[in-house]
Image (cartoon, rainbow, N blue to C red):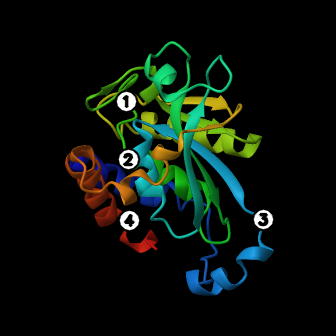
């Protein structure tokens, strides 16, 4: 997985900077002083267990709020137990509120595609089931077009050994997960799953995205 991270890092440096001729000079600290004046935007991603994904996106500059929850299913108000059955159709997702003056949707997609394996169908490591599928739930046409474009370019350039199978679907009702799922890694860092699964992912993430960390 670490090999993949560095492999697509080089590609993404090109892909995600294309056409951007004006660099952002605003610093994170300066932007923080104007946080209330800027309209936050929303992004929703599924990339396996939401505990892992939440822990990573919480550490990005410009990401102001991260909630774990469920989306894309066929029943209302699903519980964790129901989603884990694989019968509701929901994916475990995180919904992000972010400051576009600090981090763009394009940059969020760069992180998304590097922190999990988007080529495995309904599986991330030992977590198996449709609830763990790789999915981008877009909130507007611009997000849809960008997600589809990047997915196509990743496949055209054969960045991964296998085709990217990430689902790209319109956002539907977001159901916030139970309280004990929120801020999970920060509150349960010594638990076995955190130590053996989340912590290694975080360390790899920090090496690749050191310039984007809070």
Q: Spatial distance from mark 3 to mark 2, Cα to Cα?
A: 27 Å
Image coordinates for residue 65, horizontal then vertical, percent: 60, 59
Residues packed near mark 1 inside 10 Å, few (<14), some (14 to 19) or many (20 plus): some
Q: Is residue 103 left or right of residue 112?
A: right
Q: Which is nearer the eye, 5 or 28?
A: 28
Q: Which residue is mark 3?
A: 39
Nearer-the-camera pick, 68 or 104: 68
Q: Please, what secondary structure does the residue beneath circle 2 have?
A: helix
| Residue 214 horizontal/vertical position (percent) | 46, 74
Residue visible at 55% across and 39% down in the picture: 177
Mark 2 — residue?
Answer: 52
Q: Earlier in the sequence, mark 3 or mark 2?
A: 3
The x, y position of residue 145, in whole percent, is: 68, 40
Labels 3 and 4: the sequence-earlier one:
3
Left or right: 112 in relation to 159: right
Q: CA distance from mark 3 to mark 4?
A: 25 Å
Residue linked to disc 4 = 209
* Distance between mark 1 and mark 2 Cα atoms: 18 Å
Residue under label 1, please give it.
119
């Amino acid at each position: 997985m670490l090999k993949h991270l560095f492999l697509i890092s080089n590609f993404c440096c090109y892909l995600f900077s294309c056409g951007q001729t004006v660099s952002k000079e605003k610093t994170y600290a300066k932007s923080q002083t104007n946080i209330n004046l800027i309209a936050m935007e929303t992004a929703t991603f599924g990339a396996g267990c939401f505990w892992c994904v939440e822990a990573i996106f919480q550490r990005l500059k410009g990401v102001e709020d991260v909630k774990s929850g469920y989306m894309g299913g066929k029943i209302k108000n699903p519980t964790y137990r129901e989603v884990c059955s694989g019968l509701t159709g929901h994916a475990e997702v995180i919904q992000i509120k972010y400051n576009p003056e600090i981090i763009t949707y394009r940059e969020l997609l760069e992180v998304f595609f590097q922190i999990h394996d988007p080529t495995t169908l309904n599986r991330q490591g030992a977590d198996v089931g449709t609830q763990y599928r790789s999915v981008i739930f877009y909130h507007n046409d611009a997000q849809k077009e960008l997600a589809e474009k990047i997915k196509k370019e990743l496949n055209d350039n054969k960045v991964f050994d296998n085709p990217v199978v990430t689902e790209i679907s319109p956002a539907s009702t977001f159901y916030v997960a139970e309280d004990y799922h929120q801020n999970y890694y920060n509150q349960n860092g010594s638990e076995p799953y955190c130590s053996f699964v989340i912590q290694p992912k975080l360390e790899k993430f920090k090496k690749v995205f050191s310039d984007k960390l809070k």
